[in-house]
Image: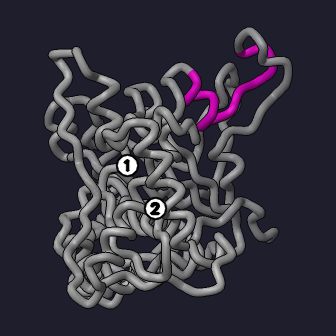
Amino acid sequence: MAMSTTPIPALQDVIGQSDAFLNFQERLSRAAGIDRPVLIIGERGTGKELAAARLHFLSPRWQGPYVPLNCAAMPGSLLDSELFGHEAGAFTGAISRRKGYFERADNGTLFLDEIANLDQQAQSKLLRVAEYGTFDRVGGSSPVEVNVRLIGATNANLPQLAREGSFKKDLLDRLSFEVLAIPPLRQREGDVDLLVNHFTTRMAVGMGLDVRPEFSAQAMSALRSYQWPGNVRELRNVVERAVYRASGNTVTCIDFDPFGSDLETLHAGTPEVTATPAYPTCPVDLSIPLPEAVRNIEDAYLKIALERSRYNQKKAAGLMGLTYHQFRSLYRRLRREK
């Protein structure tokens, strides 16, 4: 059996020590060894694709192909052909037979992310494959047999969609041999610290920094108390952005919303859009002398304003609420003090 050459998600990002995280990983490991369909549910950014890949590589099928497909990335008109393939001449442009995702995942695992986006026709054919292991290519009449383990993932309420009739109850029953719910980051006590250290180190290495930046106590407090609606993906972006913007070896400012006042400016004069600016969180750190803290803030404002104005100094001055001459004076002073 040939080992899959499909790119593997960053499994090294599966990090945690909280009870919620460890309990989930234990359930996942047990489910991996049972050759049955699994549904992974969780909020956005919790790592559903990482969990699916881990299921595959811990399973007896680990040497077989692992084939992921994002069902939300393809319109319904193409999804049928992508899943099941097509015969030559099945439609305009189909000049040759093409294998679909099911055939490519034969003897391995097919991961259907955003499975709630499947239309009714694709759901019906998926149910047949799940039940009997056979399907017809688009434009074909001869059944194709495959041996595929199905893993689905969604942040939608599939039981509710089934009650409403938009998701087939039979398919839901067939796919939910086991349902693994990934805990959101706000329920993973203590894991924020581990993930911050991991993403900080990775960003520092990627930027070629000689010294790994450290987050101040106040900055870490802000990260721990935030509710993380975007979960681990959002945390990674916030941490990496903070490291990238830091002017020294200590990270003191956390920007939870990179749009900030830019979004407010973009939609100015548009009554139907309400933009609430979010400003960087700069906690007070009394271990830093006030003059140094003021310089750090001035330097951070200067750097961000220049980046957002694409280094147009007149525009950067406007973003900072300064005249051009005030901006130039600040710019020269900060350069001298470095």
Which contiguous range is marked in magenta?
78-90
Q: Which amino acid type is shown beneath numbered disc 1?
A: Pro
**For the residue labelled by badge 2, is the local secondary structure a helix, a strand or a loop?**
helix
The residue where tag 1 is placed is 258
User: Compared to 268, does 99 lie above or below?
Assistant: below
The structure residue drawn at horizontal position 69% and vertical position 47%, both measured from the top left corner, is 103
**Front-most of residues 173 and 313:** 313
The structure residue drawn at horizontal position 49% and vertical position 77%, both measured from the top left corner, is 248
Q: How many residues crowd around disc 2 within 10 Å: few (fewer than 14), some, or many (20 or more)?
A: some
Measuring from the top left, give residue 154's x and y in whole percent: 34, 50
The structure residue drawn at horizontal position 43% and vertical position 62%, both measured from the top left corner, is 299
Q: Which amino acid type is shown beneath numbered disc 2?
A: Arg
The structure residue drawn at horizontal position 38% and vertical position 86%, both measured from the top left corner, is 194
Q: Quadrant of the N terminus?
A: bottom right
**Front-most of residues 234 and 76:** 234
Q: CA distance from mark 2 to mark 1?
A: 9 Å
Colour scheme: one colour
The residue where tag 2 is placed is 241
Q: Does 142 appear in magenta?
A: no
Measuring from the top left, give residue 277's x and y in whole percent: 22, 42
**Front-most of residues 9 and 290:** 290
Residue closest to the far right:
96
Measuring from the top left, give residue 161's x and y in whole percent: 21, 37
Quarter-wise, where is residue 274 in the image? Answer: top left
Tell me, yes or no, if residue 40 can be seen here.
Answer: yes
**For the residue labelled by badge 1, is the local secondary structure a helix, a strand or a loop?**
loop
Q: Are marks 2 and 1 in contact (CB under 8 Å)?
A: yes
